[in-house]
Image (cartoon, rainbow, N blue to C red):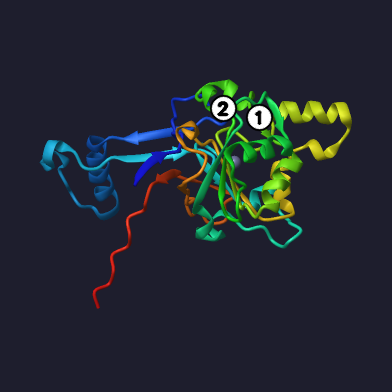
Amino acid sequence: MHLIDLSSPIDAKAWEPNPITHDIMTPAEGAVHMAREMKEHADIDFDPSVLPDGELLNLDTLSLTSHTGTHVDAPSHYGSRAAYGVPLTIDELPLDWFHRPGVVLDLSDAPVGTIGAERLEEEFDRIGYTPRPYDIVLLNTGAERYAGTPEFFSDFAGLDGPATELLLDLGVRVVGTDAFSLDAPFASMIESFARTGDRSVLWPAHFAGRKRAYCQIERLANLSALPPTGFTVSCFPIKITGAGAGWTRAVALIGDEPAAPIPTV
Ligand SMILES: [Zn+2]
């Protein structure tokens, strides 16, 4: 078995619409900080220079949205109410949605805008496989070419309503994309609404989750390194109580997974 990393980094130096702050306390600063805290809170004197290299431990403090880097959107992200009941937050979702056979659809030739159901069906025919219930379907839209630049957030392709419904009808509960969003870019949806007056063109992929519970993985990486089928995706979201999304270190596992040890009793 080997592993392929499908995650993009959380990088405070990269351009983001919601900038990340990442404050790093070095191990030497950590030593001074600890000595100061001990004095202040317990009136204990401690000389940090007695530590090896005068260093204690590093500490990273971050400020970022839960939609930064590769992350899983929970049903509660899509609206406060749903047709099926109260939408689940990221900490409440069943873990077994997130360790399942993967399917990659190559949509990397899609222009900026929407991808329709017919295009997905063409791709099922090309790869000779139609997703089964609970498969994790990954859309390779080619968005990775703009990773780290402002274009990543404006120039991508996303699913229209019928394309999203097609995947949900097949029983898929986790759909991943390498793009910023599973929907088309904001500007393209708003332009299409202004032209047609049709409200169904506004965030159809996200709003489909108000009818049926499902999750999206956004900002995946490395999808072109995967075969169309024959691998497992593992993408457990971080357990943030009450949150609408959580970061994930998504990976693909290719080949046989090691068998669990057999109990000898
Ligand atoms: Zn998101």
- Give the numbered dot on residue 157: 1
For marks 1 and 2, the one nearer the N-term is 2
Which corner quadrant of the figure contains ligand 1? top right
Residue 200, by quadrant, is top right
Image height check: is 118 above or below 88? Answer: above
Q: Nearer the viewer, residue 99 or 202?
A: 99
Percent across and percent down for residue 171 are 65, 55
Percent across and percent down for residue 109 are 62, 25
Q: Nearer the viewer, residue 148 or 41?
A: 148
Q: Residue at x 43, y 30 (%)?
A: 11
CA separation in Å, label 1 and label 2: 9 Å
Report whether the residue tagged 1 is closer than 8 Å to ligand 1: no
Q: Does the image show residue 226?
A: yes
Q: Amino acid at mark 2?
A: Gly
- Give the numbered dot on residue 142: 2
Badge 2, how many Cα within 10 Å: few under 14, some, many 20+?
A: many
Report whether the residue tagged 2 is closer than 8 Å to ligand 1: no
Side of 28 where 242 appears, left or right: right
Q: Amino acid at mark 1?
A: Ala
User: Do labels 1 and 2 touch, CB within 8 Å?
Assistant: yes
Is disc 2 placed on a helix, strand or loop? Answer: loop
Seen as rendered, the residue at the extreme bottom is 265
Percent across and percent down for residue 182 are 64, 38
Q: Residue at x 46, y 37 (%)?
A: 226
Is disc 1 placed on a helix, strand or loop? Answer: strand
Residue 23, by quadrant, is top left
Image height check: is 245 above or below 8? Answer: below
Side of 94 where 119 appears, left or right: right
Badge 1, how many Cα within 10 Å: few under 14, some, many 20+?
A: many
Q: Does the image show residue 249?
A: no
- Give the numbered dot on residue 68: none
